[in-house]
Image (cartoon, coloured by chain):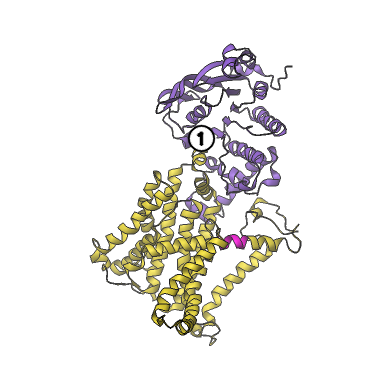
Amino acid sequence: MASNIRPAGVFDTSYAQDMKINRTRTSRFLANAAFVAVLLLPLLTAEGGLGLSVVPAVWVGIVVRIAIYTIAVIGLNILMGYTGQISLGHAAFVGVGAYSGALMARLWGIPFWIAVPLAGLFTALVGLLFGLPSLRVKGFYLAMATLAAQFIIPWLMRYPMERLTNGSRPLEVPDPQFFGFSFGPQVVMYYLIIPLAVLMAFLARNLTRSRVGRALISVRDNDLAAELLGINVFRYKLLAFFVSSFYAGVAGALWAFDIGSLSLDKFNLALSIEFLAMLIIGGAGFPLGPLFGVAFINILRENIIPNVVSNFKVVLPNVFPFIAVADVESSLVPFLFGLALVIFLIVEPRGLAYRWEILRIAWKIRPYAY
Amino acid sequence: MEVNIVADREKLNMPVKLRVDNISLSFGGIKALRNVSFDINEGEILAVIGPNGAGKTSLTNSINGFYTPQEGTIYFEGKPINHLPPYKRAKLGISRTFQNIALYTNATVLDNLMAARHIHMKATNLITGAIFYGVAQREEIEHRRRVEEIIDFLEMESIRKTTVGALSYGLRKRVELGRALALEPTLLLLDEPMAGMNVEEKEDMARFIIDIHERQGTTIMIIEHDIGLVMDISHRIVVLDFGQKISEGTPQQIRHDERVIKAYLGQEA
């Protein structure tokens, strides 16, 4: 990618300048604008206390969920996008994080701000264990090995650990405690989770542009060459599993505290596949890929598809009398979802983030593509 | 006509850098290497030649630790390295290029070279890397300087931020040489660095190899099919055929060796 193209008149005079994430005025402006918009969003709703209701209140919840999912998918991006190790067990790791965070708060009353990183670390260790097969197998065979995690972990939590996890019944999660304050309302959770998500994204971005990230990319692009050039390939594969599961664990714990009630059915293979779909649609191996993918799929599922379906519910049974109203919804939702994915994979297989890079270049070299 | 660019033949008396002692390597019933022994002396350019399938690349892979010979020992600077995994051999200062280019295709030229600085960048780990500002950035800049020297030396300034996948074959070969150099090797293994190049590109590459040798005194083992070129730039030549060493000596000796002429250059023309 020639994303390092500079617009006319922007020159680097030091290596530090060359390494900046937001080098041009436009990209700094965009980053700041996005930051301010996200910060102001809850204040603009009816619950914001300013008496404005410019933005529907559901958006607060949607953005929180996008943030939590993004943390999880950033983890998957490090493992799959940067290190090239396919994982079909990511949802199980998110589940481990959710349940370990919730149990820490329930059993020992550990405060929110300690429980979240601890849940992350615990999940990272579990991920390390399930990353061990990567020593021997790669590609689809590794995907099969991680699929084992997706089945073993929920099973373990459902049956042998039933007394802790409530098995098939939902597990109530206490409201997060933070220096004695209890967080209930969505708006407060928002201001807790969004900064954390920004921090996690920042750390991931840094990691992937440093020595560690280059080692991971080396493993992805050519593991033999990486080994012969001094990179301990197995160590870095495990490191990728560790970091990836850490992100999954943090996302899981945040999820637990956000929704307040956990059910094991959530963390199934379908969610793992959804994470994969989000990463691929967003752009695997791109820093912004996870955010784009998660936002796109969430908005598609929560806003676009319900709108389309509600229209079809009226139209279809009128045009074709043999179609029942109830069937329209149950069959059209997965159909439209699948259709959107297929169109994406055909039109932009490298993901939204790739398209974004192209747009950036086009903007930088405007008005003349010299 | 005899044109020898490298005239310092007195380097033949330097200490042994790498000793290959009686190694044999087989894959099932195929014997890739049979009782091969030779030394690479400190500071020399040693060429390994031989027909296709003679075992040249197997030999390089054995030195790297990618293959483990069933018999024999490889000594690097006097110490046996048979038991070391490849990445530890790289840390000793053995670097290489590949016959079929093995770059990190989706990364930029700069990142490819920086990735080879891995063993020298000790301050950046999981934590300092994630924080980046401070320790990691300082180290990044320090090593960027070294990498820029290599980019300058190999005349790759214009492509430093181009993704390797977008480069031509000749340039990729050059990037690969740059990556091997970024590791700061004391022993450089070049597996057919000029394969598939035109005369001009070959001359460039030969110039780079000689420059590396003269500037840094790097010991170089080169596998190459272009006999004329090998004769010009190497101090000594080892000839392999069907996994066996059939001759070893200065270019002069090799040129007149009956067995070499028979095996490599074909029956008397």
Q: Is residue A57 above or below residue A152?
A: below
Magenta: main secondary structure equals: helix
Q: Is residue A149 left or right of residue A37?
A: left
Residue B129 horizontal/vertical position (percent): 52, 52
> From which residue to which does the magenta span run?
A351-357
Decide: few, some or many residues near mark 1? Use Cα within 10 Å; few <14, some 14-19, many ≥20. many
Q: Is residue A108 above or below residue B146?
A: below
A108 displayed left or right of B201: left
Please check the rendered image and state whether residue B154 is part of the magenta-colored stretch, yes or no: no
The percent coordinates of residue B88 (x first, y second) are: 47, 35
Residue A30 in view of the camera: yes
Chain A palette colour: yellow
Q: Where is A314 relative to A292, above or below?
A: below
Q: Nearer the viewer, residue B49 or A85?
A: B49
Residue at image location 36% in from the left, 64% down from the top:
A268
Query: Is residue A114 something that shows in the picture?
Result: no
Where in the figure is residue B142, as x and y percent of width and height?
A: 61, 45
Q: Nearer the viewer, residue A40 or A300?
A: A300
Q: Determine the colour of chain B.
A: purple
Residue of label 1: B90
**Quarter placement of the N terminus of chain A:** bottom right
Task: Give A367 or A19, whichever is nearer the viewer.
Answer: A367
The answer to which image quadrant residue A170 occupies is bottom left
Residue A355 belongs to magenta span: yes
